[in-house]
Amino acid sequence: MTFKHKDQVAELLNRRRSGLAHMFKILYIVGELLIINISLIAALFIIYDRTNTSTFDKSLLDYLRTAPFLSLAAFLYIDYLGMTHFFRKNRVDVVSAGIQLVFLTTITGAAIAYFGTWFSFSRYSMALGGVLMLVLTCLWSLFCLELSKHIYSKGKLLIVAVSKDDADRMYMKVCGQLKTLHINYLGYTIMDHVPRVLRLVDKSTEVLVSSAVSESDKSQLYLYCADRDKTVYVVPQFSDLIYTKFRVVQFEDMPTFMIDSLGLTFQQRVLKRTFDVIFSLLAILLTTPLQLVIALLVKMDSKGPALYSQDRITRSGRIYRVYKFRTMEDEAEEKYGAFQSSLDDPRVTRIGKHLRNTHIDELPQFFNILKGDMSVVGPRSDRPTTIGEFEDSIPGYNQRLKVKAGLTGLAQISGKYNTSPEDKLSFDMMYIKNYSFLIDMKIVLQTIWAMIPSRKNYNIMDGDFENWEFVPKK
């Protein structure tokens, strides 16, 4: 391997997740929300004749009624467009996102004014405010882009190729844009001995992989980089174009797929946790009478406690106790053995069948969500032993632990009762990679629909079965 720089590689991950980085993102959001509101208020001052005090005051009052809803919508758009992610972006990226934000915000403001019948907040002020907003948003985003380069460490790029000529070809593509993307070039390595290449990956922060590298070697490389939060740029083959959401970084005329580290950003975690607390509190308050009745019915239907608890695993491998209403006979594992539950499981009690069919046996898990063990939406929680067993046969299965386990999730509402663990993992990875608050809302609504009792929907939210292990049925 040939290195241009032999100095010690700075740990990029610490800089990207530092308190300073989080404060920078919050500053950007606050600044953008101020720009949106100041632009529209400035438009009112320009459009209206302030000598006509009553007309101007009415227009300003109408805007102030709109402002809270517009600011909330703008915040969600900022998150959805990933505008706080300045990592390895260029000016075109941030300006493009700014244009989309201004368009969505302007349309939303007009819609709110229309449905609120606040007609004095006119389309002319919205149009002028949109123009001011666009100029200020682009300037603010470009300023923050330059500021981010002083907050995040420079990247250290390693090229993985199949030959020197292959490496030289890729280097000629990337060299012109390394400075713009805030990256230093370390050198290249030939993919001839995987363990040696992986050791060299440890000395980099980002890896550019040639399309000529074999699929088996790529798989090992991707998993290794994912475990160590390395950023990977993939030169795609034609078959790779079917990938779900990705970001394209183009080096001259060579496009690459940027596969960044999995997991949620700081502001996404804050927003998600805020929603979890509010949603779980409301759910607990609304369902407490129902939960008391269910607990009484479970006790009357069969011997044993009303609640069932079990060790589960969540984000970063943390173990917690999950709670749900008991739907099986007490100590069913000792009586029948441990095996995956089915539609006509003899261990399930009479009331348990109804609870499972409506999924209301899961209501106590809102207390887990309130405590912070789980999230409303996320990958389904597994028993600690199953993670290791699945990981042996499905490499990368533990990547689901990049986020908190969820009460519901994309795999639950998109999959079926017998969906394979491999396919469930694919859904989980799609959710983690494409996460946004709006996607969480969509999954929650789809889950409510799936809770309508029917045999078709039975155990659609599978994976949380009591007494379930990878052993043959006795």
Image: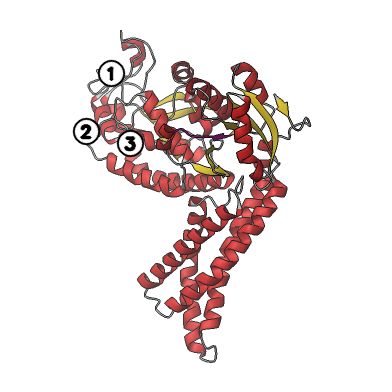
Q: What crowding class fits label 1: few (fewer than 14 Cα within 10 Å), some (14-19), or many (20 or more)?
A: many
Q: Amino acid at mark 2?
A: Lys
349 or 38: which is nearer to us? 38
Q: Secondary structure at mark 3?
A: helix
Residue 247 shows up from this direction: yes
Residue beneath the point at 28% across and 18% down: 347
Numbered badge on residue 414:
3
Q: Residue at x 51, y 51 (%)?
A: 79
The residue mark sitting in front, 3 or 2, is 3
Give the spatial CA distance, label 3 vs label 2.
13 Å
First in sequence: mark 3 or mark 2? 3
Q: Which residue is mark 1?
A: 347
Single out the residue that lies furthest toward the bottom.
51
Q: Identify the mark at residue 456; answer none if there is no mark.
A: 2
Report the coloring of the rendering: secondary structure
Q: Are marks 1 and 2 in contact (CB under 8 Å)?
A: no
Q: Which mark is residue 198?
A: none
Secondary structure under the numbered disc 1 in the rendered image: loop
* Label located before the other in sequence (1 or 3): 1
Counting every numbered tag in the picture gives 3
Q: Could you give the CA–CA distance between mark 1 and mark 3, rounded to whole angstroms?
A: 27 Å
Q: Amino acid at mark 3?
A: Ser
Front-most of 323 and 245?
245
User: Which residues, given as a range, are shown in magenta?
Assistant: 232-237
Front-most of residues 163 and 229: 163
Query: If you read the primary sequence from the N terminus, does the residue marked by circle 1 or circle 2 appear first?
Result: 1
Residue 329 position in % (x across, y down) = 31, 19
Residue 188 lies, with reference to residue 152, above or below; the image says above
Residue 406, horizontal then vertical, whole percent: 44, 35
